[in-house]
Image (cartoon, rainbow, N blue to C red):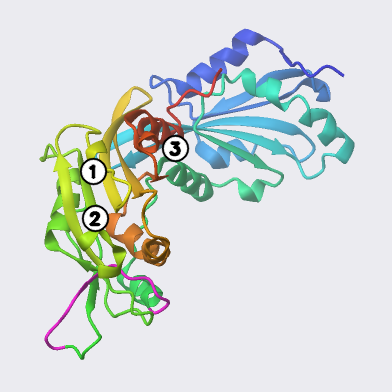
Amino acid sequence: MSTEVEVQDMDAFLQAIADIRSDATETNWGIFGHVDNNPNLVCSIATGSGGVEEFKTFLDDKQVQYGLLRFEEQFEMSVTLKFVFIRFVGPEVSFSIKGRFGVIHGSVEKHFHQKYHIFMESETMDDINEDSIRQKIQENSGTKDKVLEASEGARRQERGYVSHTTKSPSTPSGAGSVTAVNKSGSGFSGMSSTAKTGLDLNVKDEVYQAIQNVRSDDNETKWCVIGYEKDTPKTKTLVVVDSSSEEFTFSDCLTPERPLYILCRSTDIVDDIPTVKYCLVCWVGDNVKPLDKGKLTTQKGAIDKIFDPFHVIINASQVSDASKRQIEDKIALASGSKSKIK
């Protein structure tokens, strides 16, 4: 059996894809399938502008079909287009037919030029809905909101997750108030209580200001390096090491004996639209003591909350792991803007 797939009426097939991708049309979905259940021949079945629910009306439980859908995603001040490719294998498709159609899947994808941000595979229509697809888009691009509501934050801290702790004169010894960065990175509110694990991080105000500077469109700061007082997590005190308005020039800070966190601001081109992305680099030098490395592991949850939201995270122990190319490639892969065609 051949593993190559041909297209019936290539003009109609390419026009359907072009309409979905075009800003000049309202078409936001297209469905494609096999001609007479022939695994080596595909065609365009239908297109429309009614979104996911309309798309689902053309799915057939007895068929193997493919969908290309267009979504708009808004993050901060930018609106970008995201494309989702769906492979639907109906629940009534027999096991033997699934095998025959499975081997030609790669050839089918080639006709869509692999220019999509999310791939989904489903055997039931229930899995295909707008909420779940948008959640996958947000997780892939890093725009999913990770900031906790006040009630959820308090509940999680009872289980041992802590952000910024500041002593209050009116609270008993050992208690404190916990605050976290909001979506824009410009303020901190919404959490209270102290973790029963006693994992309190003392975050100096300069640290929050440095993070805010990286996030602000009105500030030229492109990165900030945050470290520990005396270069050890045993102090549980975060301080600013350095910051700059020049992109990716923090390598001098990456010494082998210290643990550091670097928040970087970068611009990624997604569907020809410049989009601001944030990367968190967790640097642990090769000469960091084993006990300190263990401390860092216990503090990871608290650290993530302090720097949230960010799109990608890189764990690095070599300077080359945190290079401009590595960071930009990681961001591009996460957002779907990096070409996967070889």
Depth-wise, is mark 3 or mark 2 nearer the camera?
A: 2
Can you identify the residue that label 3 sits on?
334
Which of the marked residues, 3 or 2, is nearer the chain's N terminus? Answer: 2
Q: Label 2: few (<14), some or many (≥20) within 10 Å?
A: many
**Percent x, y of residue 127:** 62, 49
User: What amino acid is at disc 1?
Assistant: Cys
Q: Which mark is residue 253?
A: 1
| Left or right: 102, with 183 as reference point | right
- Contact? badges 3 and 2 (CB < 8 Å): no
Q: Is residue 73 above or below residue 261?
A: above
Q: Between marks 3 and 2, how big is the CA–CA gap? A: 26 Å
Report how many numbered discs are placed on residues in the image: 3
Quadrant assignment for the N terminus: top right
Closer-to-camera residue (310/20): 310
Closer-to-camera residue (241/217): 241
**Percent x, y of residue 31:** 62, 28
Can you identify the residue that label 2 sits on?
227
Q: Can residue 59 be seen in this view?
A: no
The span shown in magenta is 158-170
Q: Label 1: few (<14), some or many (≥20) within 10 Å?
A: some
| Residue in the picture at 13% in, 88% down | 170
Closer-to-camera residue (153/243): 243
Q: Between marks 1 and 2, how big is the CA–CA gap? A: 10 Å
Quadrant assignment for the C terminus: top right
Which of the marked residues, 3 or 1, is nearer the chain's N terminus? Answer: 1
| Left or right: 49, with 161 as reference point | right
- Contact? badges 1 and 2 (CB < 8 Å): yes
Q: Label 3: few (<14), some or many (≥20) within 10 Å?
A: some
What is the secondary structure assignment of the residue under circle 1? helix
**Percent x, y of residue 193:** 28, 80
| Residue in the picture at 46% in, 22% down | 21
